Amino acid sequence: MSNDVKDNLKSHSTWKRGLYMLLYIIFTRIAEVVLGMVILFQFLLKLFTGETNDRLLKLGQGLSTYLYQAFQFLTYNSEYLPYPFGAWPKGEPKPAKISDQSETSAD
């Protein structure tokens, strides 16, 4: 193996990111299940009452934005650590920038 590969294998930042990535894979699976329940419940509400629930709309938007942020991190499109290491997202996601490490939330 070349020295570059050995250095990469010994890099603490790479292993630290790998641990975060493993955690976010677990978090996204949980969020997907919860979002699926929100989707189903909203559909049933609309079907039987003709209306949607405002609180579930906000939860659905937050979960959707969270999943976007997490997938951006997992695919190396962002260095921003989403919730629970960052702020819970509010509103629609902003486009991620690879070099944007100072982003605090998706307002």
Image: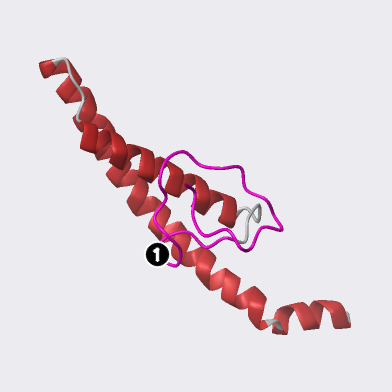
- Residue drawn at point x = 59 percent, y = 70 percent: 17
Percent coordinates x, y for residue 8 in the rendering: 76, 77
- Horizontal arrangement in the rendering, residue 65 relative to residue 47 (left or right): right
- Toward the viewer: 36 or 54? 54
Give SS at disc 1: loop
Q: Which residues are magenta?
A: 80-107
- Toward the viewer: 38 or 4? 38
Determine which quarter of the picture holds residue 85: bottom left
Q: Please, what is the three-letter code of the amino acid marked with disc 1?
A: Pro
Any part of residue 1 in sight = no
Percent coordinates x, y for residue 83 in the rendering: 42, 60
Reply above or below: 87 against 45. below
- Residue drawn at point x = 56 percent, y = 42 percent: 94
Count the marks. Answer: 1
Residue lying at the far front of the rendered structure: 107
Q: Is residue 7 magenta?
A: no
What residue is shown with label 1?
Answer: 84
Determine the main secondary structure of the stretch shown in magenta. loop
Is disc 1 surrounded by few (<14), some (14 to 19) or many (20+) residues within 10 Å?
few
